[in-house]
Amino acid sequence: MREPEVTYKPESLTASRPLLWGAAVLSLIMMAPVAWLVGLSIKSNQDLMMGTDSVFRFPYTLVNYLNILHSSQVFGWLLNSVIVATGHTLGVLVLSSLAGYGFARLEFPFRRTVFVIVLFGLAVPEQAVIIARHQMFSWLNLHNTYLGLMLPGFSSAFGVFLMTQFFRAIPKDIDEAALLDNASQFRIFWKIMLPLTLPAQATLGIFTFLGAWNDYWWPLISATRKEMYTLTIGIASSQTNFAQSEGLGFLAAQAVFASLPAIIVYLIFQRHIVTAVSGGAVK
Amino acid sequence: MSASIELENVSKRYGALTVLDDISLSIAAGEFVVFLGPSGCGKSTLLRMIAGLEDVSSGTISVGGRRVDTLPPGKRGVAMVFQSYALYPHMTVRQNMAFGLENIGVPKDEIGRRVKAAAQTLEIDHLIDRKPQKLSGGQRQRVAIGRAIVKEPAAFLFDEPLSNLDAALRGRTRLELAQLHARLGSTMIFVTHDQVEAMTLADRIVIMNARRIEQIGTPMEIYQRPATRFVASFIGSPTMNFLPLTAIEKGQSGLALSVAGLGRVETSFPSQTKIDVEGASLGIRAEDLSISAEGETGIPLKAEIVERLGDRTLVYGVLGDGSKLTVEADGRAAVRAGEVLQVRLAPDTFHLFAADGRAVRGGQ
Ligand SMILES: Nc1ncnc2c1ncn2[C@@H]1O[C@H](COP(=O)(O)OP(=O)(O)OP(=O)(O)O)[C@@H](O)[C@H]1O
Ligand SMILES: [Mg+2]
């Protein structure tokens, strides 16, 4: 017998026209500044001096990008950003996973109270503590160090909350089966529970990384020496010193260059984000 | 490989709430014991205490003569199959089965050999590299059993392992479990609230109710000689008929009972039996009643509902005084709802229960 042919068309695939147009217009509005930036970055500084409308005319050039390779400090800043954002992300993942597992599975005194206190962290804005933190780091001689740039981010109330919820969603039977399988507490965490939270790790990791990558305020305060700048601070400083900078096209090229790593990270991990958001990770 | 299990005065309390009260039970090596009881009576709790997943509030548990209630779950030599199967979702079938052996340092080739043997026994060797998500309910169930088998445990603990399967698969798996028990000869404890599973699988059934064990016995003992009114009503379908007593006297050869709806009946319960009429009741299984042939006399019963099951017919009716009575008749019995039948009693099949629910022995 032959399989009957599938002839129906799912309704969701044929979105209505007005909706499509609406989405297109919104996308254009979102994309315009990005496109503008890319346009500026492929024009020579001389052309841009005459007026930025030259973006719409030939000739285009990659000279600004070549200049980054040769002259700019961008590479140093890029490296700083990679180190800080990666360290920050790893710290958040490790601490949030351990804390989440603890809150979800271990019995200890004042567990609920401590959890509530941790969640209070969500309500405290960075601005409220920045002066105290600045002083503390200054006493500890942590300013202008990688550790100093990373440390404040480690305590992520959101991360702890997310991981706690994720661990809680894993059926208790699974831990118990592992207990009966002679697994130690750490082995249960490491071999059973942690792998089951991978989608959450990916989500938390990518958001943390992007947040750290784009962070501006704390690096601005903590990194005062130019060689400790992260990308955001570095680029901002060259933009504010526009008069001494090497021109608008060069700045735009720097900005494009700076956002590439974040885009790459997003592209690599976006599959996991979709998995995590659409659920069904633990069944 | 199989071991006896001994529970002595085991209790479980959650704060002020007592969930199990002074349970004592000994299970012989190789025996298949079923814990049967209504929801919430503590079956799972008792099983989990044997497994080590719950602490014992008081009392002791031994497996194979060795006291285990102070040992962690992994060290007790028992394996458990969960109702939810509790497979590790991120591991393949092979890894699921191997995990417990890796944890105790069994050599790799030995693990491979045991996993292969178990997979063949359970006919899941073609699924060995799949993850649980890609398995059907019945296949997951087999993997869960396989995970227990490879550990070669002293005893298997099952907590309602069949309840997530559809009816046909449940019946088949039940048979396979019986075969597995016959082949391995291991001690098995099986928790269920399905009396068919209990009757068909068990060497002995432990009937539990409200924190206590009501009766322990072979399936036929439990069915034929229920120790309490609870057991009598819990086992058997349709439920046993219970009729209150109004008087108990010495009869010709045993007790003569005045039964609501039936009048005075002579029984073979020894006449010296001491029993208070207050709260006492007579139990009669539907299958021990029959419909008299045309013209014979009997107890009149007005049939209200007639259920035809093919091989037998269940007649739900009311007696003269309004008491309800269920009678099991032949599959071809010509009974219609609304009709008045004559019912014949078989006094030596009666069960007599005192006010506290205890069965009065003797007679039958
Ligand atoms: N952690 C707990 N705290 C308090 N009471 C509990 C706890 N766990 C179980 N109980 C109680 O213990 C009793 C027995 O529970 P248990 O799960 O053993 O019942 P069961 O016989 O397995 O029922 P079922 O057939 O529904 O699975 C129930 O009344 C339950 O409410
Ligand atoms: Mg249960």
Image: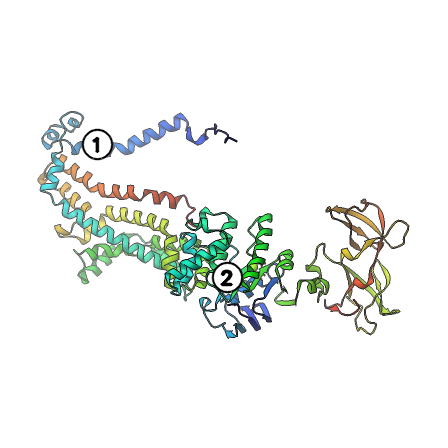
Q: Would you place residue B39 above or below residue A79 in this image?
A: below
* Residue A113 at least partly seen: no
Instruction: Identify the amino acid type marked 1.
Output: Trp
Horizontal and vertical percent for residue A186?
Answer: 36, 63
* Residue B144 at least partly seen: yes
Q: Which colouring convention does the figure follow?
A: rainbow
Q: Would you place residue A272 above or below residue B105 in this image?
A: above
Horizontal and vertical percent for residue A54?
Answer: 15, 26
Label 1 chain ID: A
Instruction: Identify the amino acid type marked 2.
Output: Met
Q: Is residue A80 left or right of residue B71?
A: left
Rendered image: mark on residue A214: none
Q: Nearer the viewer, residue A166 or B1?
A: B1
Q: Is residue B150 left or right of residue A59?
A: right
Q: Nearer the viewer, residue B267 or B153?
A: B153
Q: Would you place residue A7 above or below residue B179 in this image?
A: above
Q: Identify the element where label 2 is drawn.
A: strand
Rendered image: mark on residue B80: 2
Which residue is disc 1 drawn over? A36
User: Is the C-beta of the residue carrying label 1 under 8 Å from the nearest atom of ligand 1?
Assistant: no
Label 2 chain ID: B
